[in-house]
């Protein structure tokens, strides 16, 4: 039995790192309830449930409403359609995308992403029969404003830290091992030998595997990344700084009364921490959107 546990433990570990880096970190950075931006809600039947993402609202003393819209990069087409409708109600939407500011994804184009990460995400979306964010979100809306690093900026920042994707994997692996040491039984994980065997033997294998991925993505324990490591990782800390710089400029425009930041869920605790501590924003509301519906 011990020989069987190793590959399943590796699969569980790999799935979480895949989620954080390849799916752009859908896990929250901390397990505290106030910092959760993604959750899984189980249904009443076997292999039934929903992966949900949060829209958290804030307001400052000037009455500006700021909404942190947590993104998952794979989701139901209806989920993205609702987000498109929501974004039309905003004065400005600050979005994440490592690209040149004028390099706008073409909605519905299968050439939305030419990177290896994008290719894997698209392949996974097809396997799970769900949509891919760059194919579904309308980035051509006039109120969309790029709020991320460019590829050259990202590469320069990583080089200045002697950082590469291998070192990021290594740091995340260390965080993962620390979590496993703190909770070696890992009772909350959906990725275990019994559940995977059950999913593979299910009549609807696709729905069962989708359920396990959704449950794991919504687990608040996930890959726990502390504030110090967040700041070290360019993909998290430096991109948060880029978004906050654009937000600071946007707040100077008196016409922007309804502002949204559309970023990956893992970025949101750090962004929330900064807007609360340095920009005078306080929480005013929370709503949940169904990103994945299983079956």
Image: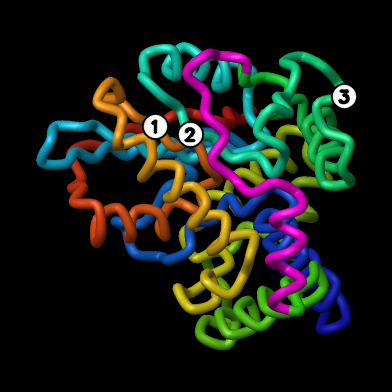
Query: Which residue is rendered at x = 51% and y = 85% of the image?
Result: 182
- Residue 131 makes an appearance in the image: no
Judge from the rendering whether residue 291 lies leftward or rightward of residue 105; answer left or right: left
Q: Position of residue 264 (x, y in %)?
A: 55, 45
Q: Nearer the viewer, residue 223 or 69?
A: 69
Residue, disc 1: 260
Location of residue 33 (image quadrant)? bottom left
Location of residue 46 (image quadrant)? top right
Q: Quadrant of the N terminus?
A: bottom right
Alpha-carbon distance for marks 1 and 3?
Answer: 26 Å
Alpha-carbon distance for marks 1 and 2?
Answer: 6 Å
Against 115, residue 154 (above or below) is: below
Query: Which residue is rendered at x = 34% and y = 53% of the image?
Result: 272
Looking at the rendered structure, the secondary structure element under dot 1 is strand
Of callouts 1 and 2, which one flags the residue occurring earlier in the amino acid sequence? 2
Chain part drawn in magenta? 140-161
Residue, disc 3: 111
User: Label 3 neighbourhood size at 10 Å, few (<14), some (14-19), many (20+)?
Assistant: some
Against 53, residue 160 (above or below) is: below
Alpha-carbon distance for marks 2 and 3?
Answer: 23 Å
Q: Position of residue 70 (x, y in %)?
A: 47, 40
Q: Nearer the viewer, residue 51 or 172?
A: 172
User: Label 1 neighbourhood size at 10 Å, few (<14), some (14-19), many (20+)?
Assistant: many
Q: Position of residue 127 (x, y in %)?
A: 84, 32
- Residue 45 makes an appearance in the image: yes
Residue, disc 2: 94
Judge from the rendering whether residue 176 lies leftward or rightward of residue 142; answer left or right: right
User: Label 2 neighbourhood size at 10 Å, few (<14), some (14-19), many (20+)?
Assistant: many
Judge from the rendering whether residue 274 lies leftward or rightward of residue 28; answer left or right: left
């Amino acid at each position: 039995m011990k020989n069987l546990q190793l590959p399943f433990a590796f699969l569980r570990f790999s799935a979480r790192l895949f989620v954080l880096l390849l799916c752009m970190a859908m896990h929250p950075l901390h397990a505290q309830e106030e910092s959760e931006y993604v959750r899984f809600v189980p249904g009443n039947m076997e292999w039934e449930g929903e992966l949900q993402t949060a829209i958290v609202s804030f307001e400052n003393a000037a009455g500006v409403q700021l909404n942190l819209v947590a993104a998952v990069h794979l989701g139901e087409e209806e989920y993205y359609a609702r987000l498109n409708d929501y974004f039309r109600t905003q004065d400005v939407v600050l979005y994440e995308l490592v690209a040149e500011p004028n390099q706008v994804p073409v909605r519905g184009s299968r050439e939305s992403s030419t990177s290896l990460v994008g290719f894997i995400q698209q392949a996974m979306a097809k396997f799970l029969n769900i949509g891919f964010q760059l194919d579904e979100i309308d980035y051509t809306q006039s109120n969309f404003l790029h709020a991320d690093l460019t590829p050259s900026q990202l590469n320069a920042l990583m080089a200045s830290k002697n950082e590469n994707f291998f070192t990021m994997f290594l740091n995340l692996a260390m965080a993962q091992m620390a979590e496993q040491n703190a909770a070696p039984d890992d009772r909350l994980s959906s990725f275990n030998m019994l559940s995977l065997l059950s999913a593979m033997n299910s009549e609807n294998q696709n729905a069962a595997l989708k359920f396990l991925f959704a449950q794991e993505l919504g687990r608040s324990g996930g890959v726990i990344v502390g504030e110090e490591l967040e700041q070290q990782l360019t993909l998290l800390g430096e991109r948060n700084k880029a978004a906050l710089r654009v937000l600071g400029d946007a707040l100077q425009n008196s016409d922007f009364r309804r502002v949204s930041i559309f970023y990956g869920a893992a970025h949101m605790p750090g962004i929330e921490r900064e807007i609360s501590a340095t920009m005078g924003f306080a929480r005013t509301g929370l709503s949940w959107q169904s990103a994945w519906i299983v079956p």
